[in-house]
Image: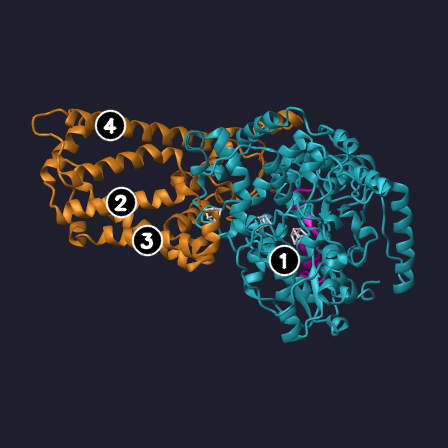
Chain colours: A orange, B cyan
């Protein structure tokens, strides 16, 4: 059992990391031949991170657009963030100071996360426009997240799975000495389900729309500086067809993250 | 009897070629008198999703002769399927926007009620994300592991003739106005996807008549309206005479004057279409009053550039490069662009890339400069005087052209594209009324005719797509007696002139910002 999950665990993490990095590499290296910031946009490079942060931290454009979708999405992401933080003890041998504060939230982060997910699911069912655009994988991802949150909550708070054992297994994985005496895979069913679903999520992640988490930083309408009259942008392929001079990729990259 | 039978067999439905199948509307196009716009109530309602209500909207196909002139195949390619997928792969490598936007849409639904064509036609496939999905389906099928393994479950689909027909329809129901992008958490710009789709279609022999004919006209004659230099000269001369009659002043409309300080580039519609020409008179009066030497150019007698609408970088650059010739010939110090939405986006955002850097121009001025930037600056410096009382019969509101609002800027500060035209209107008129804030500035609704859709074969779409703007306008018309819709776009002007009467509003309500300047400007003081 332990050996099986060690292999699956490493495989999933490897697929996740390689997959995500490959995508990020692709987003980072595909050129932008034209200036297409969605204006009004920052006119200096320093304004870009501010704009980006307001989107990533506050979901500003979504808020402007639709408060219900914003609420559903925001609640889910906040819940997810707290839940991920709450897993800190499985990642650090000695727990960093302050993190145990998150334990006082008990099971609420998981419930918040499920609440947001439930609302997102409901929106797909009751709003005809959302229904129209949804396909199987859209429903599946929400259900996958709900299942992960639910099994996690159950494992921790109802079945009281042995935390120490989970920790030792995880530490074994992280320190690349997985088959140690104390790091056997916990065999409670609920934990096995929870862990397997997380592995499934990791494997599916780089191939799915979850790549929005990285892709958002590469969106040219949001990460470009509004300075086309002052600063000339030419992509190498466009220079080839026109005999234009090439602005060095370095120069471009210095201007805004991910824009080269 | 026998005779009748014979005729019946003769009238057997004509067998359509594959190309005709793609271009043929699924339901017949409506005649102008069959198009019934919504009633104007002043409020914009989000409709229930319908299926296929807009499937009849397909523009005419471009004839092979003009396709070939642009370097595209004259007929649907034998290997169109493989060629389309190959072109898609090519674009995915060339455009970060396309690559990233293919992957990161979470189908949150935020953009679904933001497109004027969806609101107007109620057709679900006119929701921005649904439009993009027509492209994404194919992307998933051929370019993603997810789509290859999960197929339909992941929304992946093979590109067949039927889907190509949907592409032809729905990617020509996007005015590339970018309103959806404003409301998307990731800024996904459906305009980028429409452009890519049109580029792919052109490459397999499926082109749109209106856009492609116009590009051919620019290459062959020099402007969208197909006016040769001689005709242009004659028009300008007769307009000059009219102007002298009207004002008693010798206000010039110079053409090709080598050594002029300012080279003025404007959409060719300004030269004679109505109400466009009223703005042209405005430019001329402003230059006259400022005492600056300026000229139009016959080489660059078109500011518009339909290369953008068809998503073709090469065509866009070729059209833009006419300006390089004009600059080399006339050797101006400054470059000023007239009232045109997409033209200003291209001038502001793309010219430097396409045909820059403008090293021969005076660096003390923006290169290029918008006519509104230029005129307002003169007003602020007191170099020209505007007598607002001359416009007291006018209660204007301003329609932000989407290409200017969301794809460009004026002035030094973000949002100058909103304040500068408004300040100019306010400097020309005593009164000014703003439309509903959900329909202006960065949230502006397109006029319904942008993006290469300003053609009569898409009239129904244009009428319906104008609905949100018409509702917002009718609201201020009712509440504040607004009687002038101020515009800074040649396409907007043509579109509204045609569409306003359909909604029962007089077409003289639409006009340019410089039309207001033209009637307010004080022509005496300086002489
Ligand atoms: S708003 Fe953006 S992410 Fe949401 S459905 Fe529309 S395109 Fe997709
Ligand atoms: S760009 Fe404009 S026309 Fe096109 S889908 Fe978006 S909102 Fe609609
Ligand atoms: S015609 Fe005017 S409103 Fe319509 S797309 Fe162009 S700029 Fe926008």
- State the separation of the CA atoms marked 4 and 3: 29 Å
Mark 1 Cβ inside 8 Å of ligand 3? yes
Question: Could you confirm whether marks 1 and 3 are on the same chain?
Answer: no
User: Where residue B97 sits: x, y (%)?
Assistant: 52, 38
**Residue A201 placement, left or right of B242:** left
**Residue A69 placement, left or right of B317:** left
Disc 3: which residue: A118
Q: Which residues are magenta?
A: B362-382
- State the separation of the CA atoms marked 2 and 1: 47 Å
- Name the residue located 68 percent from the left edge and 66 percent from the top edge: B427
- State the separation of the CA atoms marked 2 and 4: 19 Å
The picture quadrant where one finds residue B443 is bottom right
User: Where residue A106 sits: x, y (%)?
Assistant: 17, 52
Indicate whether residue B495 is drawn in magenta. no
* The label number, if any, that marks residue B400 in the structure image: 1
Disc 4: which residue: A8
- Give the chain of mark 4: A
> Do the residues bearing badges 1 and 4 touch, measured as CB atoms within 8 Å?
no
The mark nearer the N terminus, 3 or 2, is 3
A24 to A230, vertically: above or below: above
Q: Is residue A149 visible?
A: yes
- Name the residue located 17 percent from the left edge and 24 percent from the top edge: A3
**Quadrant in which the C terminus of chain B appears:** bottom right
């Amino acid at each position: 059992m332990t050996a099986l999950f060690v292999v699956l665990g490493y495989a999933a993490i490897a697929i996740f990391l390689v997959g995500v990095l490959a995508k990020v590499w692709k987003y980072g290296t595909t050129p932008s031949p034209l200036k297409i910031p969605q204006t009004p946009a920052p006119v200096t490079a320093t304004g870009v991170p501010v704009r980006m942060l307001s989107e990533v931290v506050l979901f500003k454009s979504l808020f402007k657009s639709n408060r219900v979708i914003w609420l559903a999405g925001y609640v889910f992401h906040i819940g997810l963030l707290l839940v991920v933080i709450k897993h800190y003890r499985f990642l650090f041998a000695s727990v960093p100071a302050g993190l145990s504060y998150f334990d006082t939230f008990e099971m609420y982060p998981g419930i918040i996360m499920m609440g947001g997910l439930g609302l997102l699911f409901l929106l797909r069912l009751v709003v005809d426009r959302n229904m129209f655009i949804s396909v199987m994988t859209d429903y599946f991802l929400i259900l996958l997240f709900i299942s992960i949150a639910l099994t996690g909550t159950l494992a921790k708070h109802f079945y009281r799975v042995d935390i120490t054992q989970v920790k030792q297994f995880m530490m074994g994985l992280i320190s690349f000495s997985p088959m140690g005496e104390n790091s056997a895979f916990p065999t409670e069913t609920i934990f096995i389900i929870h862990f397997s679903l997380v592995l499934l999520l990791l494997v599916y992640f780089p191939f799915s729309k979850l790549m929005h988490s990285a892709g958002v930083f590469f969106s040219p309408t949001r990460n470009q500086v509004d300075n086309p009259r002052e600063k000339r942008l030419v992509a190498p392929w466009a220079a080839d067809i026109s005999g234009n001079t090439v602005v060095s990729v370095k120069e471009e990259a210095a201007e805004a993250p991910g824009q080269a | 009897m026998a005779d009748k039978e014979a005729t019946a067999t003769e009238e057997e439905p004509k067998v359509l070629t594959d190309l005709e199948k793609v271009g043929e509307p699924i339901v017949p196009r409506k005649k102008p008198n069959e198009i019934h716009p919504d009633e104007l109530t002043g409020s914009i309602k989000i409709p229930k999703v319908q299926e296929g209500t807009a499937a009849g909207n397909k523009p005419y196909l471009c004839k092979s002769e003009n396709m070939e002139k642009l370097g595209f195949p004259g007929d649907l390619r034998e290997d169109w399927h493989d060629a389309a997928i190959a072109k898609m792969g090519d674009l995915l490598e060339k455009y970060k926007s396309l690559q990233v936007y293919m992957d990161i849409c979470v189908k949150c639904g935020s953009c679904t009620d933001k497109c004027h064509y969806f609101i107007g036609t109620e057709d679900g496939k006119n929701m921005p994300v649904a439009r993009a999905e027509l492209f994404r389906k194919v992307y998933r099928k051929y370019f993603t592991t997810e789509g290859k393994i999960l197929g339909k479950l992941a929304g992946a689909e093979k590109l067949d003739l039927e889907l190509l027909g949907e592409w032809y329809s729905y990617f020509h129901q996007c005015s590339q106005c970018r309103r959806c992008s404003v409301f998307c958490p990731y800024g996904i710009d459906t305009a980028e996807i429409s452009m890519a789709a049109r580029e792919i279609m052109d490459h397999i022999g499926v082109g749109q008549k209106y856009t492609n004919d116009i590009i051919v006209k620019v290459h062959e004659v020099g402007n969208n309206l197909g006016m040769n230099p001689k005709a242009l000269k004659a028009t300008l001369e007769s307009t000059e005479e009219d102007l002298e009659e009207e004002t008693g002043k010798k206000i010039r409309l110079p053409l090709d004057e080598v050594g002029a300080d300012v080279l003025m580039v404007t959409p060719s519609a300004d030269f004679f279409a109505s109400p466009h020409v009223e703005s042209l008179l405005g430019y001329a009066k402003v230059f006259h009053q400022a005492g600056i030497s300026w000229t139009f150019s016959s080489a660059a007698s078109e500011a518009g550039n339909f290369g953008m609408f068809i998503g073709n970088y090469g065509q866009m650059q070729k059209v833009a490069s006419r300006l390089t010739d004009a600059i080399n010939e006339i050797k101006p110090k400054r470059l000023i662009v007239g009232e045109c939405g997409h033209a200003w986006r291209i001038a502001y955002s793309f010219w430097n890339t396409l045909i820059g850097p403008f090293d021969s121009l005076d660096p003390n001025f923006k290169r290029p400069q918008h006519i509104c930037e230029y005129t307002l600056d003169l007003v602020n410096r007191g170099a020209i005087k505007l007598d607002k009382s001359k416009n007291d019969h006018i209660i204007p509101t301003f329609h932000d052209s989407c290409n200017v609002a969301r794809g460009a800027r004026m002035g030094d500060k973000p949002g100058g594209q909103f304040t500068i035209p408004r300040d100019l209107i306010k400097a020309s008129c005593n009164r000014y009324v703003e439309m509903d804030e959900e329909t202006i500035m960065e949230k502006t609704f397109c006029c319904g005719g942008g993006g290469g859709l300003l053609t009569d074969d898409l009239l129904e779409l244009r009428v319906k797509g104008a609905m949100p703007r018409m509702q917002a306008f009718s609201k201020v018309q009712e509440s504040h007696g607004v009687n002038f819709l101020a515009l800074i776009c040649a396409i907007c002007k043509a579109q509204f002139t045609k569409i306003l009467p359909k909604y029962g509003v007089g077409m003289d309500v639409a006009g340019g910002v410089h039309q207001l300047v033209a009637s307010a400007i004080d022509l005496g003081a300086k002489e």
